[in-house]
Image: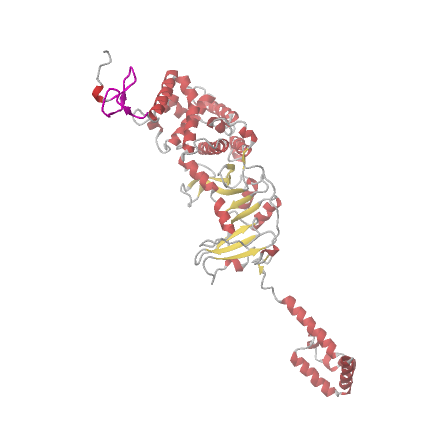
Amino acid sequence: MLKKIGREEQQAIQASESPEDSESDNSENELAGEFSPDDTDDSTKEDSSDSEEKGSSDSEEEKSSDAVAVQQKHEEPDATVWTSKDKKLMWHPTHEVAGHYAHPRIPTPGPTLYACARLTSPESAFALFIDDEIVEQIVEMTNLQGLRTSNRWSLLTPQELRAYIGLLLLAGVYRSRHEATSSLWGEKTGRPLFANAMSHRRFAEINGMLRFHNVQKPKQHHANKLSPISELWSRWNFRLQKMYNVGRDVCVDEQLIAFRGRCNFKQYMPSKPAKYGIKIWALCDAQTSYAYHLEVYTGKPPNGTRETNVGMCVVLRLTDSLEGHTVTTDNFFTSIPLAQELKKKRNYLLGTIRKNKPELPSKLTKITGRKPLSSIFGFTRDLAVVSYVPKKGKNVLLLSTAHKAPKVDNGDERKPQMILDYNKSKGAVDHLGQACGTYSTRRRAQRWPMSLFFHMLDISAFNACVLYKAVNPSWNAKKRYIRRLFLEELGNSLIMPEVLRRKPETAAGEKQAAEQQHEAAAPTTKRKQCHLCTEKRIASNACDKCGNPMCRKHMKNICKNC
């Protein structure tokens, strides 16, 4: 009630004031900044104000000041939001905006039921990839080439082709990749196993005549650069995916097969040890390095239109049959459009990203004034980016759609959890190349299809070893060179049928010699007291007739006839 009376008195006082006083009050209000933006447009509006506007000046000034405050609040940028370089994405430093998604279920990682039902030996594991259909196709095309070009060509049989593959595997076990084939069959430097399985002349004939397609159809080369081996490669690649279920984490990277001959799609990669060769895109299981899907890069297509976003297209093709997996890539493949496309297929992306991407904010790309071992996180609803400074002047950027929280390890380096997960799965393809290069079947070749064929044998042998160890975990479990033992047993089983066909007595003798060598390598019985000595004397020999232990004092040397 008191406030209401005071307001009526104030209105009466303002009404009794002169126009000069009202003008002075208006000028004071203008100096104080309590005016609406419309009053500053034209000075004539102030002179034409009537007594009704003067009576309600206080209420209008309060409303105008509130409107200006609200307008300024919306115009000021939010300090907790970072805008990307292209002004299309808003990044937040907290993970409150990140959405939470449940990972879809995936098949049980490991060999499929189809493979488990057929795994009985290393040879059967290898036959899951180089099956009878592939062997018969190679035999048919090789015989066509041999009959077409040579009058003395004897028909190649599947058993002989398997022996040829077995010799390549054994040569890889013996680290003879850079050794001449003539020395493998030499009297002084060679190994009897090679000569018993196949003659050097026959091995050279097969190596020169080996073909994987019908050479009488040269028009296919214009439509498909990979036509000399494309049919065989597709059939083999299908079997890679049929035999194994990859785990939750997979890795996509590139490989380079060394080749310096004539090839339309030969690549130069100075960062690789081989420098020149054939590039292959590979998708591998992060835990076992199982090669799940391989694709040969043939460069520019024949129609002349170069493919754009090569890294993105490669990852989408390799992961076309996968769902619910986390794909690990390097900065050549990683991009935000790729993450969005993988999200549509319920797959996740984790990988390093280049700092020149327009979708990233400058807050994450600039490291001026930042301390070493510091991390800055940025989140959207579907994406997460971390900027980690391992040392002064270096910035590591990672993009992920599988991480939704800014977790940092408590170790000395204080690495984010995203980087730790990336380090666990980034080297699967590199480990595959290293393992295949240790015991490789590659020989010097002038034709690029042969280089791809040798690579197929290396990958098949490695995948077969992974399958066999998964089904038989106790096989040579205490030994550290399991893969060498697997390849040696596989090579011997492949060449043994051909050895028996050529020289049955030699094969039997080799088998008996191997058994004797195994018995000789077995631990001998414990030495005992001499049977005829009264004093303590350890005897290392025994009598041939009675079998009692005898020392040298009670033994006599006799000839064979006596």
Q: Nearer the viewer, residue 269 or 549?
A: 549
- State whether residue 241 is above or below residue 373: above
Which quadrant of the structure image shows residue 247?
A: top right
Examine the rendering and report whether any part of residue 208 can be seen: no
Which quadrant of the structure image shows residue 544?
A: top left
Q: Is residue 541 magenta?
A: yes
Q: How many marks?
A: 0
Q: Nearer the viewer, residue 75 or 497?
A: 497
Which residue is at a point 45% across and 19% down the rendered structure image?
A: 155
Secondary structure character of the magenta stretch overall: loop
303 left or right, relative to 545: right
Q: Position of residue 391 (x, y in %)?
A: 43, 57
Which residue is at a point 67% across and 69% down the rendered structure image?
A: 70
Q: In the displayed orientation, state which residue is furthest to the top.
A: 561
The quarter in which the N terminus is drawn is: bottom right
Q: Nearer the viewer, residue 534 or 482?
A: 534
Q: Which span is picked out in magenta?
A: 525-550
Q: Is residue 393 magenta?
A: no
Which residue is at a point 42% across and 43% down the rendered structure image?
A: 272
525 left or right, relative to 10: left
- State whether residue 216 is above or below residue 289: above
245 left or right, relative to 480: right
Q: Position of residue 383 (x, y in %)?
A: 58, 52
- State whether residue 302 is above or below residue 5: above
The quarter in which the C terminus is drawn is: top left
Q: State the scheme by which the image is colored.
A: secondary structure
241 left or right, relative to 507: right
Q: Position of residue 27 (x, y in %)?
A: 68, 83
Which residue is at a point 65% across and 66% down the rendered structure image?
A: 74
